[in-house]
Amino acid sequence: MTTLNDLHSISSTFSNTDKMPVLFLGHGSPMNAIEENQFVTGFRNLAKTLPQPNAILCISAHWFTKGTKVTSMQMPRTIHDFGGFPQALFDVQYPAKGSPELALETQKILDPVIVDLDEHWGLDHGAWSVIKHLYPNADVPVIQLSIDYTKSGHSHFELAKKLHSLRYKGVLIIGSGNIVHNLRLVDFRNFDKDNYGYDWAIEARETVNNYLLDGNFQPLIDFEKMNKAVQLAIPTPDHYLPLLYTLGLKEESEELSLFNDKLLAGSLSMTSVKIM
């Protein structure tokens, strides 16, 4: 239950600010958290262009739930939700604070959608492996909003619109996933080959990028109706749906730009989006 003290804390912590950008980050392999490569450089260069946020709300491909949840703990744990990687990756901690105040505000503005306050999840690698390159000192509070797997692309796009007011309260909203993401077809032998994609991945990237840059989002919302190349790129919706949260927050007058726009290992893309 939200108390008067909670509401006072929300209003004092998240006062009106200039409009924050919105991001979609292609997070790729968890190893991006500890490796030096062109994509990590892209994240760091992006950070130089961002105003300092009061907090971050991240929609990660790796929190796929029945119903909608938001993390509400004071200190979210760093979740190492992967296997088969070097111990150095499991040793990484990202000790950003949470924000119970922002969780309550998020719950309020998404009403009448039921949003459960979650004390158990934390920050999965879809969040911390990229946010650590933007804010390496872990000095910005971070919460996560889950993706309800029972809902359509249209529902997620419309839900994102309801988060719009947070952009004017210093909240940086980040979708984290990958547009082209077919793990079954990854070509590990060519993992380090620059901008390497199968023909269908090249076609899918071009199709999606053209819609993004044209501002034609309806086909992207109805992604399940797009061509066969896109279906191969999105065999499951988990890594794609965070993009729709980013697009749902775009204002008509804003510019959309791409960065880290390359294919990887045949069947993945690192394409990322900035809106401001």
Image (cartoon, grey):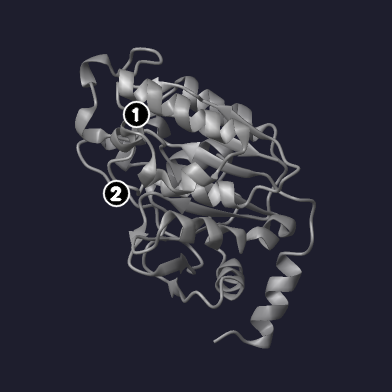
Q: Is residue 273 or residue 213 the one in the foreground?
A: 213
Task: Report if residue 97 is visible in the image.
Answer: no
Residue linked to disc 2: 81
Q: Earlier in the sequence, mark 1 or mark 2?
A: 2
Vertical relation: 202 (above or below) 127: above
Q: For numbered disc 2, what is the local secondary structure?
A: loop
Percent x, y of residue 267? 30, 27
Q: For numbered disc 1, what is the local secondary structure?
A: strand
154 relative position to 194: left or right: right
161 relative position to 230: left or right: right
Residue linked to disc 1: 268
Vertical relation: 83 (above or below) 43: below
Percent x, y of residue 238? 35, 49
Residue at 61%, 33% in the rendered image: 214
Residue at 47%, 76% in the rendered image: 114
Question: CA–CA distance between discs 1 and 2?
Answer: 19 Å
Vertical relation: 115 (above or below) 175: below
Quadrant including the C terminus: top right
Tell me the amino acid under the disc marked 2: Asp
Q: Is residue 239 or residue 153 the one in the foreground?
A: 153
252 relative position to 56: left or right: right
Tell me the amino acid under the disc marked 1: Leu
Residue 262: quarter of image: top left
Residue at 68%, 50% in the rendered image: 53
Residue at 39%, 23% in the rendered image: 203
Mark closer to the observer (1, 2): 1
Near mark 1 (Cα within 10 A), the count class, few <14, some 14-19 or many ≥20, is many
Percent x, y of residue 244? 50, 49
Percent x, y of residue 150? 34, 64
